[in-house]
Amino acid sequence: MTAEANRSARRAGIGRLLLRAAVLAAAFVALVAFSVVLAKLTLTPSPASEDIVTSNLRPGRSLRQYAEDYTFLAACKQAGGNILMGTPFGVLLPILVPRRLRMIRMTVLTVLVMAVVELTQGALVAGRAFDIDDVILNTTGALLGYALVGRRISHRYHALSDDRAAAEEAKPEPRTSPRKKPAAEPVAKRATATKPRTRAAESKSRVKAAEPKSRAKAAEAKPRGSGSAARRSAPAPTARGRALLDRWRGRREGPGGGAPGAGRRGD
């Protein structure tokens, strides 16, 4: 299952890479074609209007002139042509520039390119002059193209690279072979290793068990010896008491071993 999943992920990654390369190439070709058209429209001499056209460095001056001196159709043609001329920048440049801050980068590039074109017109092309309002209208067209089309196309284009990076991160890591456990020691070796320990423990337990018995025997032997000695050697008060008792009996019996009363009656 893992091998099949890796193959499918590789195929999907290759497909995304090819699609991204195709979109990038198409955007580059379209930008080159637009540059050619732009050069023909802006850098073509116009001798008929050489005495009429003047340079404009004030923003809004040409726009007021379109509204006051031109007819509605002529003004729409002049202003609308400049807006449409900047629209391809808003569609193609977001694909070619990095994803981060692409709108700002697209706007800056549009302003720079159109400013260079206007300066070239005023310096080298007869019948044409630099006009700041043309740069403003071209930049407005680029922003409209980005808001309507360029933002979605660039988002999908950059999403292809994000999917590829996510697929690469999701690849399973190679499995590491588990470490081999040390071989178990034979049972015979374990038994031989434990035998001396068990013997020593048994001898210690026997010695501990014999100690209380010997102590009890010694305790029992001590009172017996002391009793026999007490019996053999009676205390002095007891001996005196017995001697007095014997004397009293002898006096009562009288001489000759008879009763003392009988002797007195005979006299």
Image (spheres, rainbow, N blue to C red):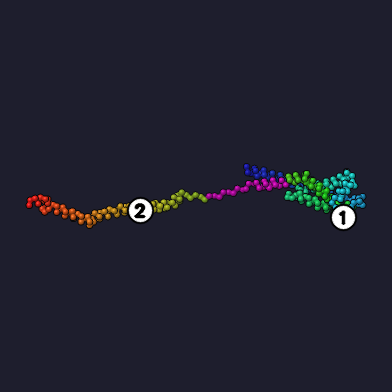
Q: State left or right for residue 84 relative to residue 206.
A: right
Q: Is residue 233 visible?
A: no
Classify 4 as above or below 212. Answer: above
Q: Nearer the viewer, residue 14 or 57?
A: 57
Image coordinates for residue 78, horizontal then vertical, percent: 87, 46
Q: Which numbered circle lies on residue 182?
A: none
Label 2: which secondary element: helix
Q: State left or right for residue 260 relative to residue 176.
A: left
Q: Nearer the viewer, residue 133 or 21?
A: 133
Residue at x-position 37% and y-position 53%: 208
Q: Is residue 96 magenta?
A: no
Going by the picture, which residue comes out furthest to the bottom? 236
Q: CA distance from mark 1 to mark 2?
A: 123 Å
Image coordinates for residue 158, horizontal then vertical, percent: 72, 47
Q: Which residue is mark 1?
A: 123
Label 1: which secondary element: helix
Q: Is residue 140 visible?
A: yes
Q: Which residue is mark 2?
A: 211
Residue at x-position 76% and y-position 51%: 105
Label 2: few (<14), some (14–19) or many (≥20) C-alpha neighbours in 10 Å:
few
Q: Amino acid at mark 2?
A: Glu
Label 1: few (<14), some (14–19) or many (≥20) C-alpha neighbours in 10 Å:
few
Q: Amino acid at mark 1?
A: Ala
Q: Nearer the viewer, residue 31 or 114?
A: 114
Image coordinates for residue 34, horizontal then vertical, percent: 82, 47
Range covered by the magenta-colored residues: 157-181
- The N terminus appears in which quarter of the rendering? top right
Residue at x-position 51% and y-position 50%: 183
Q: State left or right for residue 192 relative to residue 26.
A: left
